[in-house]
Image (cartoon, rainbow, N blue to C red):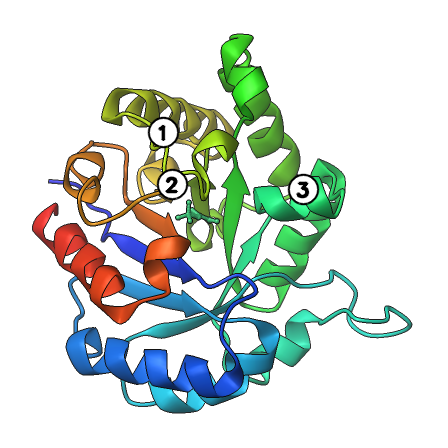
Amino acid sequence: MSQRKKLLAGNWKMNKTSADAGALVREITAAAGQRTDVDIVVCPPFTALESAGKMLDGSAVRLGAQNLHPEKNGAFTGEISADMLRALFVSHVILGHSERRTLFAESDAFINLKVLAALKHQLRPIFCVGETLAEREAGATLRVVQTQVERGLVGVAKEQATEVAVAYEPVWAIGTGKVATKEQAQEVHAFIRSLLTKHFGDAVAQKIRILYGGSMKPSNAPELLAQPDIDGGLIGGASLEARSFVELVTAAAAAK
Ligand code: PEP
């Protein structure tokens, strides 16, 4: 049995007003708020963090943000710092999501600064990597993922590495309904673990959770979550409704 507890994180993206977020959190905590056999994180938009955080009080569900800026404060119009997130009791932060990489031109070097800033402020990064369809078709998947992992984790100390969860999200599977097969996902997850082993040593690498993301839903989750190196999921669409998200939590618990 894996020594890694499964982690399920819901990436709500640019969805839910503060009031909508409160309602969704209420449903999730009513159904799964006291579960400790799976780590559960919800990541609402910035504007709903405070209301969602209040609703999570007293439950085991943790609060995540979808981004941060690496600087502490200053003239960065529209940005949010790690300190600001900590003040709202945020514990996790999604970094390097493919939508940030593609739509907002975030580089590996910039994402690395964010990872380091998060760790410095006791925020746990959910650090995303993954190839595009063109890269997969060109046979470049492992090379692309290796570059993203190595550049994104530069300067992360061995002692802090277990705070990071890596999310493997093939870009072609995000929001498309096309899910990686369990073999495709396991191959890349095992490869990522081998990179982590090279970088941090086997004992640390065995503790780092590697999540799958990309059209995960209750129907395909059990076989993905049963793979030896798939330690949970980063969920977009299926996290926007309590019923499907809670079903995924149940699937993760059953896959232990
Ligand atoms: C995501 O954006 O992180 C994601 C995995 O989205 P979806 O589940 O909708 O594919």
Q: Secondary structure at mark 2?
A: helix
Of the residues under marks 1 and 3, which one precedes in the sequence? 3
Q: Nearer the viewer, residue 244 or 49?
A: 244
* Rendering coords of residue 247 (x, y %): 17, 59
Rounded to the nearest whole Å, what is the CA distance between mark 3 and mark 2?
27 Å
Residue 174's place in the image compared with 131, above or below, is: below
Q: Are marks 3 and 2 in contact (CB under 8 Å)?
A: no
Residue picked out by circle 2? 204
Q: Residues within 10 Å of mark 1 (few under 14, many from 20)?
A: many
* Rendering coords of residue 122 (x, y %): 54, 68
Q: Residues within 10 Å of mark 3 (few under 14, many from 20)?
A: some
Question: Residue 228 sits in which quadrant?
Answer: top left
Of the residues under marks 3 and 2, which one precedes in the sequence? 3
Q: Secondary structure at mark 1?
A: helix
Question: Residue 32 sits in which quadrant?
Answer: bottom left
Q: Nearer the viewer, residue 50 or 181?
A: 181
Rounded to the nearest whole Å, what is the CA distance between mark 1 and mark 3?
20 Å
Q: Nearer the viewer, mark 2 or mark 1?
A: 1
Q: Nearer the viewer, mark 1 or mark 3?
A: 3
The residue sitting at 76% across, 42% down in the picture is 105
Q: Are marks 1 and 3 in contact (CB under 8 Å)?
A: no
Residue 80's place in the image compared with 208, above or below, is: below
Residue 189 disc label? 1
Q: Amino acid at mark 3?
A: Arg
* Rendering coords of residue 51 (x, y %): 48, 89
Residue picked out by circle 3? 101
Of the residues under marks 2 and 1, which one precedes in the sequence? 1
